[in-house]
Image (cartoon, coloured by chain):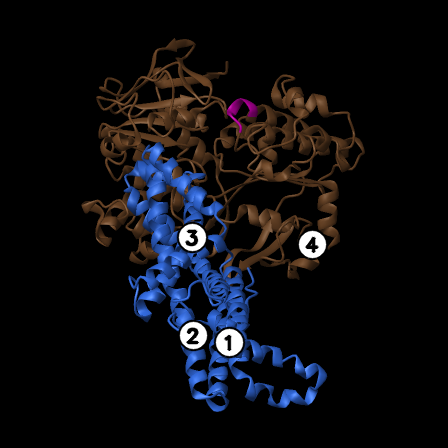
Chain colours: A brown, B blue
Amino acid sequence: MTRFSFSVSVSSEGRNLISLSDFTLEPGKITVLFGESGIGKTLLAKTIFGLTDAARLEATVNGETYSSWQQSDRVTSFRKAGFFVLQEPSSQFNPSMTIHEQYREADLARPDFETSILNGLWKSDGWQNLAGLFPQPFRPSGGEKQRFLLAMALKKMAIQDDAGKLSPDSLFILDEPTGSLDNGFRNAFLELLILQHQKQPFTLLLITHDYTLIPWLERHPSGISGSVSWKELSRADSGEHLLSRFDPSDFISWQDQLSPPGRTDGQILAELNSGVICHGRTLTFSSGSEPIGTLALKAGTLTYLKAASGVGKTTVARILMGLYPAENQALTLCGINLSSAGPSVWKRLIWGKKASMAFQLADEALNPLATVRQVFTALHRPELASDDQILRYLTPVFLTSPPKDFLSAQVRFLSGGQKQRLNLMRSLACRPEVLILDEPLNGVDFKTIRIFIRLLSQILSEGTAILLISHNEDIFDRLTLAENRVNLTATSP
Amino acid sequence: MKTRSVRFPGLPGDLFWLAIWLLGCLLVLLWDAVFLNKPALIRVWTGFGNTLSVAGISLVTALVFSFFLSSGFILARWNGFGKLAAAAELLLSVSRSVPQIIGLLTGFLILTVLVTQEVLTGKAGILTGFGVTVGLVLYYEFSDMLIERARWFEQTDFIAASRTAGIPDFHLLFIEIWWRNSRLHLINKLISGVGSTVFLLCSIDFILSVGLSHSVNAVNFPPTLGSLLAHIDSKQDILAAGLIFSDPSYLAVLFTRHLQGLSVAFLIVFTLACWFKAGISFAERNRL
């Protein structure tokens, strides 16, 4: 039993949310914890750090009641010597203080270190214009807030190190620290983290869905891979939580064999002009360094739309689906000019007929109170009217036909991966000619990633034109030819 | 989450308060049956029944009216009929800006005219007229809630994702948003609506009983709790309760001699209190 061995159980109204009899972090090492969203990773970490709401949930840690655990010396020392970066950056900021004030508050009240850390995370001094802001829901952007939070964690490490207090006994927890960052900023953060860890090791729990961290860390010249332990949290069919070692070579070998599926000579099914204006910003497209006149989606081709977070990738997807009005717009879809079409035209001719879109957040896209059966019967499609038809339809994404009672399960009780699969399958139900996938790998585990990529090849082989938005560049760059990678830039007047 | 509103094992707080209300009313009925003279007994309990009937009719009216207005407003907005949506919103805003009591008085003036001219006749017709009038004054509380629920979902990807997947607008609004995700809100609104309706009705009946017309009065209007409360016998009964401060021994006969007024006053206050508590408990139980 080490200082970082935990037996955790959390339930609500008799429903088991997380239960692990042995969750151990190796002192002085980095533990990367994978697992599909909703499996309980965040709850596990928050419970250990004493951050779970004891009034709402029944929890025990190492056999202690939760209120006793929260007041224990161990939790006090975790907080004093460590730091917890929450998954949702907005929830960690105090809206009535500027970011700069919060960056120098309490344990962080030392002006040294901050410039070098922030410059490193921004790769410039661009943070200076943002530091004086009061955090609001949409400003700074999610990625910028996340970098400020990561800067706080790095600053705490540096301060502790400077005072000779950073040690393997210090626990830092970073929950989805790179979820809103593109690869460039993600790597900049990881470089700083590795540098600090190699200078003075500490214990780190890094919760993530980003499997592409594996090859990056495994192949890092610093040799940090020797200090990383890979784990995966999953749930057995019986509902029991399982914590297992994740073999990094499984992902690396799978990723290395990825190659572009589909074809490149298909007919153009959708076109949107460069220079379209939405929400006061002009959106332009380029391929490589060459500007292109239109974003063209071809039959059987995967087009990968790329940009830093917050630039407007989802905005482009929404314009293409007629959900956002835009100026200076020339849009055709499946031969229909939709440049000035109203919602009734989209409804009659396009939505759920010729085109559909799988939205980024399955939790929002699906009705949490509907059953799996109702998700599909709501489409009023004769081929998805009976239980047998729905089960057969879902088989490709569940590998085997799900049990019949799965259809009666409410969406809110499904795991993140199951929800994401339903989200994708609902958008495919109309067999669209044009499909938009917005972050399809969000919140899913490696097993589901493999299923999705296989399904993607199948959809492309049927001639569907796909527009893909994803921050998983290491995966999708391998699945697209350079000519089908479109860069997006936005300019404001 | 721990459920705080359970009073007895297996009996949630809202049902507890409704059970208390039913039990309390039953006890008063039994007491009245023993001690109240028959004509007064019939008057009190007919008035109680009429009041509840009007409350029921007004809730149905409010629900139906708000359903059509809200769905028209939301579907017009979703489908790009901005002018129609703006007109519906204007109608809502105008009706919201009229104080309820003014709306009710106006409605009851019209009712009085209709009764005087014998356009509206018979007890059922007049009670329905009462109910519809109160319902038209209350409807915006329901339509605001229905529109608010749809707006809440508009802030997420739910509506856009459902529509682009091909889910018809009617199914999306009526089944997915209102039925599956808002019916508890609606039930909660209905529970609180019972209290609002009884309160409004008693207020207006009380005012009305003073007499808006020579030819329309408490005799040709069906009795309700409000009109009974305004009756001189009830007022005397309630005033008699004050006697116990100067003569505490009077308490022994208060509940046998002055039952009409006390029963009516009790039924009004008790109904309002129980339904209010039931609404609060229902909201707590369902975390609304």
Give the amino acid type for the residue marked by disc 1 in the picture.
Val
Q: Are marks 3 and 2 on the same chain?
A: yes
Residue identified by numbered label 1:
B264
Residue A92 is situated, as x and y percent measured from the top left of the image, at: 63, 39
Instruction: Determine contact: label 1, label 2, CB under 8 Å.
Output: yes
- According to the picture, the residue beneath numbered tag 2 turns out to be B47
* Chain-order first, disc 3 or disc 2: 2
**Distance between the Cα atoms at labels 1 and 3?**
29 Å
Q: Is residue A382 magenta?
A: no
Q: Is the same chain shared between marks 1 and 2?
A: yes
Which dot marks residue A70? 4
| Residue farthest along the left direction in this orientation | A382
Other-residue count near label 4 (Cα within 10 Å), few / some / many at <14 / 14–19 / ≥20 = many
Name the residue: 47% across, 49% down. Answer: A234
Residue mark closest to the camera, 4 vs 1: 1
The furthest residue to the top = A290
Q: In the rendered structure, which amino acid carries the disc numbered 3? A: Phe
Name the residue at 64% across, 23% down: A130
Q: Are marks 1 and 3 in contact (CB under 8 Å)?
A: no
- Secondary-structure class at tag 3: helix
Mark 3 or 2: the one toward you: 2
Q: Position of residue A460 (x, y in %)?
A: 26, 29
Q: Which residues are magenta?
A: A181-185
SS assignment at label 4: helix
Q: Chain of mark 1?
A: B
**Mark 3, other Cα within 10 Å: few <14 / some 14–19 / many ≥20:** many
Residue A108: where, in percent of width, then height? 75, 33
Residue named by callout 3: B142
Indicate the quadrant containing the N terminus of chain B: top left, top right, bottom left or bottom right: bottom right
